[in-house]
């Protein structure tokens, strides 16, 4: 029955996607993040819904009469360059069959990222994109939080099987990254009941992150909490609240959770940590041996090569780090492009924050830039321990901050033109304002 319900709902969206291709973007996000078909047990489990939605979205975009143009800016150019570079490194991959398989999945993600950049052209669509991401991943946050309360945190929270967030670490990482977006929706939503619901989902999702028993997520959550404290106006009250939450949490935390988190300071005794160090060393050695193209996708599964570069390793391991993943697979050029993406996103956040600080009509963008920066920090810190360099969520976050910057720029340009336009009067001509440049206008109107 569940298979039939989900299948009929997805099929019903197909004609709508053809008429309004932007709906295809929201459907793609729903299928990618919530994975509703993975919550079934019958015929719908393996049906290629995401592929069908992607193809219909592309067809609908071609048939649509609305303007279709890929924005040209730092983020879009870098994503194009990364798509080209990973395609090139796949041609020179050490394990071509494995590399081709991951390339196919990656290039689909990047293709839909470009479609999102083309179709998200206004604030309403941007807001809808944020909502669908929050609702899709927030479902597992709320569900996991309730599960943690019912079981007193004695069992780990997992994601849906055969998905990007199946593992407890991957789920915790995704939930932590989306937490700032939940907060953004809470502070920008006028409906009090929606705000209260989002507040409850914040608490439950945060609880689900800790109940996942993910040490990487715990470290990332600590960094994000400290940065949030530095940015907060009421530092004393927030500090007091954090102390109370930590004290209460420590008193009720299961012993097995405390023991697992305590292994962070004893990483030299932990087999999992030593395996990560072996994988990181392998990534660096592969990049040194192949500085331009790296080893290609999934090079770490070449058993002989892994043991050649890291002979002291017990067995080959996945990179468990977005940084060593990109470095080992795509060389120093790929690593540089990936790093530039993060720096550009941070710059966009600051650009928006500075130019919207004193503009009430752009308060939403100011709040979004603050929360997006925290999401990128969570991705950067948590990703140091996971293979999530080519996860949809990162590229949707980049698209969100890129579109927000474009919308802010448009607003500033419109305001500038309105200020510099002389009023229509029947008397003597009114002189133009003494704004020589756009920067003079921005400074005088802060």
Image: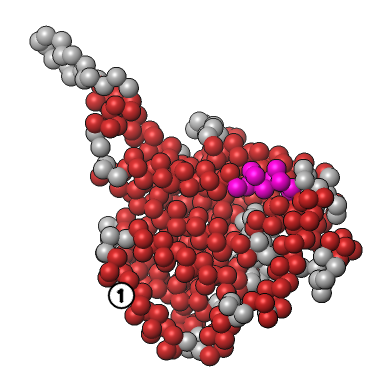
**Residue 25 versus residue 183 in the image, above or below:** above
Image quadrant occupied by the N terminus? bottom right
In percent of the image, x 65 and y 44: which residue is there? 336
The one of 76 and 28 positioned closer to us in this rendering? 76
Q: Which residue reaches farthest right? A: 304
In percent of the image, x 30 and y 75: which residue is there? 240
Task: State whether residue 407 appears in this view.
Answer: yes
The magenta segment is 330-339
Which quadrant would residue 322 be assigned to in this image?
bottom right
Q: Which residue is mark 1?
A: 240
**Residue 44 versus residue 394 in the image, above or below:** below
Prevailing secondary structure of the magenta residues: helix
In percent of the image, x 82 and y 71: which residue is there? 312
Q: Which residue reaches farthest top? A: 428
Which quadrant would residue 171 be assigned to in this image?
bottom right
The one of 309 and 70 positioned closer to us in this rendering? 309
């Amino acid at each position: 029955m569940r298979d039939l319900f989900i299948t009929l709902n997805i099929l019903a969206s197909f004609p709508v996607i053809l008429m309004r291709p932007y709906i295809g973007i929201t459907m793609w996000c729903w299928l990618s993040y919530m994975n509703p078909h993975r919550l079934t047990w019958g015929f719908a489990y393996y049906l290629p819904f995401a592929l069908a939605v992607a193809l219909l979205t592309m067809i609908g975009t071609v048939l649509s009469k609305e303007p279709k143009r890929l924005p040209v800016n730092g983020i879009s150019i870098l994503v194009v360059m990364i798509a080209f570079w990973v395609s090139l490194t796949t041609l020179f991959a050490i394990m071509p069959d494995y590399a081709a398989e991951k390339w196919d999945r990656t290039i689909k993600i990047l293709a839909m990222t470009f479609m999102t950049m083309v179709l998200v052209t206004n604030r309403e669509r941007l807001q809808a994109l944020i909502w669908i991401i929050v609702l899709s991943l927030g479902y597992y946050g709320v569900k996991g939080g309730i599960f943690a309360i019912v079981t007193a945190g004695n069992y780990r929270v997992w994601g849906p099987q055969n998905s990007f967030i199946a593992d407890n670490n991957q789920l915790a990482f995704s939930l932590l990254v989306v937490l700032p977006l939940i907060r953004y929706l809470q502070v920008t939503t006028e409906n009090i009941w929606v705000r209260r619901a989002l507040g409850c989902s914040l608490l439950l999702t945060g609880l689900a992150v800790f109940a996942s028993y993910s040490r990487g997520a715990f470290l990332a959550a600590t960094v994000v909490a400290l940065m949030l404290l530095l940015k907060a106006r009421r530092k004393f009250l927030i500090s007091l609240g954090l102390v109370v939450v930590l004290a209460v949490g420590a008193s009720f935390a299961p012993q097995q959770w405390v023991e697992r988190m305590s292994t962070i300071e004893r990483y030299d005794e932990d087999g999992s940590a030593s395996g990560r160090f072996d994988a990181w060393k392998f990534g660096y050695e592969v990049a040194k041996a192949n500085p331009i193209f790296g080893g290609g996708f999934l090079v770490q599964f070449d058993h002989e090569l892994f043991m050649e570069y890291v002979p002291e390793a017990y067995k080959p391991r996945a990179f468990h780090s977005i940084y060593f993943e990109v470095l080992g697979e795509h060389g120093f050029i790929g690593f540089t492009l990936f790093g530039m993406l993060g720096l550009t996103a941070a710059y966009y956040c600051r650009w928006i924050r500075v130019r919207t600080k004193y503009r009430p009509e752009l308060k939403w963008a100011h709040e979004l830039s603050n929360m997006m920066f925290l999401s990128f920090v969570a991705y950067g810190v948590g990703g140091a321990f996971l293979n999530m360099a080519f996860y949809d969520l990162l590229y949707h976050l980049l698209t969100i901050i890129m579109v927000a910057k474009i919308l802010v720029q448009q607003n500033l340009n419109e305001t500038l033109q309105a200020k510099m336009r002389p009023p229509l009067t029947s008397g003597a001509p009114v002189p133009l304002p003494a704004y020589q440049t756009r920067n003079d206008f921005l400074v005088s109107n802060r």
